[in-house]
Amino acid sequence: MNALPVHTRRRGWCPGVRRPMATGDGLLVRLHPFAGRLTAAGARLVAEAARAHGNGHLDITARGNLQIRGVSDETYPGLLALLDRLGLAEPEGDGPHRLTVLSPLAGLDPLDRFDPMALARAVESLGAVGNGLAGDGLPAKVFVAVDGGGAMPLDGLGADLHLTAAGTGGVAFGVPSAGDLRGIGTASPADAPDAVRAILAGFAALRRTGGTEARRLRDLGPDLLDGLAASAGLAPGPATLRRGAPPRAGILSAADGRAVLLALPFGRCRAGQLIRAAGWSERYGTGEIRLSFTRGILLPGLSDRDVPALLDEARQAGFVTDPGDPCLSLIACPGRPDCAGAATPAPADALRLAAACPDLLAGGVTVHVSGCPKGCAHPGSADLTLAGRPDGRYDVVLQGATRDAPLLHLSLDELMIRLMPAKTSHDLGAAFPERSR
């Protein structure tokens, strides 16, 4: 039950249960349950722990992890002991706390063309202590998206490696590149875990030997990527194309009936909301909740008869249930002051922008407001990405992510003036004529 001493903690890594991160509202403790799955009883205990040991606020992250906020140095030891007893503390050691991200429908999606849960378990075992990768210097932020081809595409996650369903019944390997996925080859489902091991181990070796300074596999140049693909024995395959954005709320088909995806504005969740969701999963579903990479909660195993009652209760509890709700096009991190690394109050600024251009959001144009260039809330691309600067202005990126070169720097008021007339994606481009210069 070891934890990093408080005085040696720093910002900039991937926090966990054993290694919390100091931020604006206290220590942030991040849980990494496999496939984002929690039992109703486990979710209830986590929510109660967030009240007892934190400030009662939680975040669901863009990888389907769960963050407890506002933990103090005095309350942290008790929280660590509780989460360790529940089996929710990550293994000791460096490297990724969880290697894979899946659709919350994984294992239940009738549209999946291979078993993503089985493949993800095999990939996760590669990072276990004693299996090589955990001690080979693989950066903690590296992760693999395992997408069986179902109803919730993972294309926009910004993973280092995307495993998707190939048309031949195999697994296509892709890496994000210029707003798309660049295919680097294919493997059979049986051979895919060994290929993933070879690629990740090869990347770690390149870093150890000075072959690259890239901190993420996705940032390697094409020649190095092709070399890793060849060393992994991948067969040539077609280009991997994006499949579009996943639903962020609403009713979904599942093998065991219906599933309901409940959205949370900006992924912020109160302890009481998580307790309510746990109760609904017991009353209407299978007694399980699944944290979604869309920063919401999926409840599986529902009957058509119970769905209307659940949706009504969820709306009253502050969840978004309508997939067409304009607020789902708006993404923001906790921002200042909750995050010590943020330069701007991202949620408040995002809401002001939403009030200035409601038609733009209603049309499905995505806007990501980040308090700093890290882009924790949304590592992928958005139609409009704004990254907070120390001077209070925002770096402006069109059709890109926070890591992309900004078009210009504007204050919030300047942004609102430009966006007020915008109603469509075409209008969005016209609001920034500098792009065509």
Image: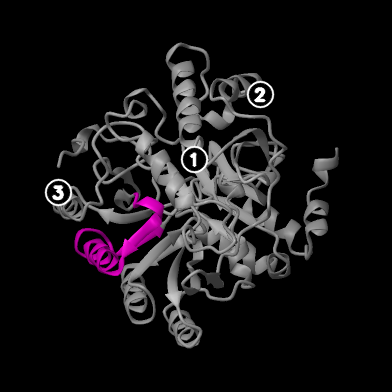
- From what the image shows, is residue 364 above or below residue 78? below
Residue 129 placement (x, y as % from top left) = 27, 32
Residue 144: assigned label:
1
Left or right: 252 in relation to 326: left
Look at 38% across and 43% down and name the residue there: 98
Q: Amino acid at mark 2?
A: Pro
Residue 291 placement (x, y as % from top left) = 42, 60
Q: Amino acid at mark 1?
A: Val
Look at 63% across and 70% down and name the residue there: 326
The crowding category of the residue bearing disc 2, from other C-alpha atoms within 10 Å (few below 14, some 14 to 19, many at least 20), is: some
Look at 78% across and 58% down and name the residue there: 425
Closer to the observer: label 1 or label 3?
Answer: 1
Q: CA distance from mark 2 to mark 1?
A: 18 Å
Going from N to C along the chain, the mark reached first, 2 or 3, is 3
Q: Amino acid at mark 3?
A: Pro
The crowding category of the residue bearing disc 1, from other C-alpha atoms within 10 Å (few below 14, some 14 to 19, many at least 20), is: many
- From what the image shows, is residue 211 above or below residue 319? above
Magenta stretch mostly in which secondary structure? helix
The answer to whether the residue labelled 1 contacts the one labelled 3, judged by CB atoms less than 8 Å apart, is no
**In this rendering, does residue 398 appear at all?**
no
Q: Which residue is mark 2?
A: 222
| Of the pair 163 and 48, the residue shown nearer to us | 163
Give the magenta range.
32-59
Going from N to C along the chain, the mark reached first, 2 or 1, is 1
The answer to if 274 sits in the magenta stretch is: no
Residue 358 placement (x, y as % from top left) = 68, 69
Residue 369 placement (x, y as % from top left) = 57, 53
* Secondary structure of residue under mark 3: helix
The crowding category of the residue bearing disc 3, from other C-alpha atoms within 10 Å (few below 14, some 14 to 19, many at least 20), is: some
